[in-house]
Image: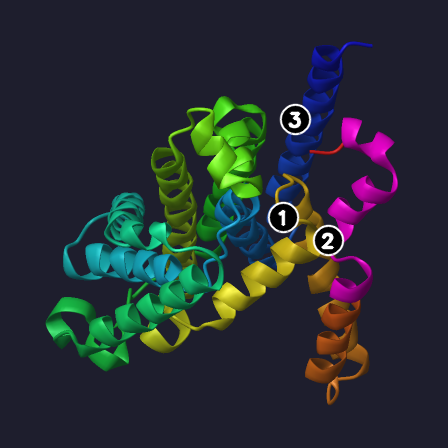
Amino acid sequence: MSSSRLIWIRTSIWLAFLAISAVALALLPVYGFSLAFWFYLLLWITLASGLNVMAGFTGYLPFGYVAFYGVGAYATAVAVKMHGLPIWGGFIVAALAGALLSLLFARTLVLRGIYFSIVSLALAVICRLLIAAMPEDVAGGSYGISLGFSDPVGAYYAILALLLATLLTVTWLAQSRLGMALRAIRDDPDTAETIGINIGNARLKAWVLSAVIASLTGGIEAWYTSIVDTETAFNLLVSTKAIIFAVAGGLGTVIGPVIGTLVMLVVDDLIWQNFPILNVFLLGMVIVLLMMFLPSGIVGSLVRYKRSLRRFLF
């Protein structure tokens, strides 16, 4: 069977799975399921997939990824609460704010490895301090902003739509010329530059796309909770969890962040129910063991040990 035929079959199966999953998830509110768990499951898959665009395809691990999430949350809250825009207008503002912030931070892409990660973390802290220091009538001050209304069901459908858009985008990216260029840059930037790949342009596209996904996620979460403050919007655990979930599943794969998030959230929930006092300790042990025995993540390690699976897994 030709490689193009295999790619077509694999893509068709994946898209069919996404369609069936979307219908099932869309019916959950109709049948009265509790939305809290499902909303945050979809949120973390979206964040992990968005981070995967940058970390998985280019090899740049942004510890300060939360900066885009927090700015998106605040942009939505300010646009809706203080300027009277409808919620969808707030999401547009959030996407624009994320894109603008990524362009402002674009200079950091000249750094490599841990230097980039540390600088991105420092910039996230700076963003938090700047927003907290703004006048109350501009960004709510240190007390944050209350939207005055919330719509958990609407926010659930919004995060579901964003997740589907993100997974479809990453699916396209994995098979596109841009995706191949990004992988080449990740594996050997010097060789990639030698064969004519515009490294700066390719990285910037991935950077902006990753930032917009995070900022829209932050905006939707603001709608879900109705309250935005610097303590939660710029909590470094947002970056930490997104990285752990993406790495656990397998960076550079489409399905990896989905599997990683599902597994880690289920494990966390089981540990919390059965060992609430030792929750953090046991979860940390699970993460350590996962990194020791499956260093490429669940999907990455499966593909490495059984190469025939590469034909069927993104």
Whether residue 186 appears in magenta in the rendering, the answer is no
Point out the stretch of residues depicted in magenta: 290-312
Q: Amino acid at mark 1?
A: Leu
Residue under label 1: 251
Residue under label 3: 15
Front residue of 301 and 172? 301
The C terminus lies in quadrant: top right
First-in-chain label (1 vs 2): 1
- Residue at 74%, 11% in the rendered image: 5
Give the answer, above or below, for where 11 lies relative to 151.
above
Give the answer, above or below, for where 223 lies relative to 162.
below
Give the answer, above or below, for where 171 lies relative to 244.
above
Question: Toward which corner of the image does residue 302 lie, by quadrant?
Answer: top right
First-in-chain label (3 vs 1): 3
Image coordinates of residue 294 in percent, x first then y, are: 79, 57
Q: Is residue 102 left or right of residue 57?
A: left
Q: Amino acid at mark 3?
A: Leu
- Residue at 46%, 45% in the rendered image: 158
Check if mark 3's residue and mark 2's residue have beta carbons within 8 Å: no
Q: Amino acid at mark 2?
A: Gly
Question: Toward which corner of the image does residue 121 lie, by quadrant?
Answer: bottom left
Q: Is residue 65 visible?
A: no
Dot 1, how many residues are within 10 Å of its Cα: few (below 14), some (14-19), or many (20+)? many
Residue under label 2: 297
- Residue at 36%, 50% in the rendered image: 109
Check if mark 1's residue and mark 2's residue have beta carbons within 8 Å: yes
Give the answer, above or below, for where 190 lies relative to 109.
above
Image coordinates of residue 181 in percent, x first then y, are: 50, 30
Image coordinates of residue 114 in percent, x first then y, are: 48, 64
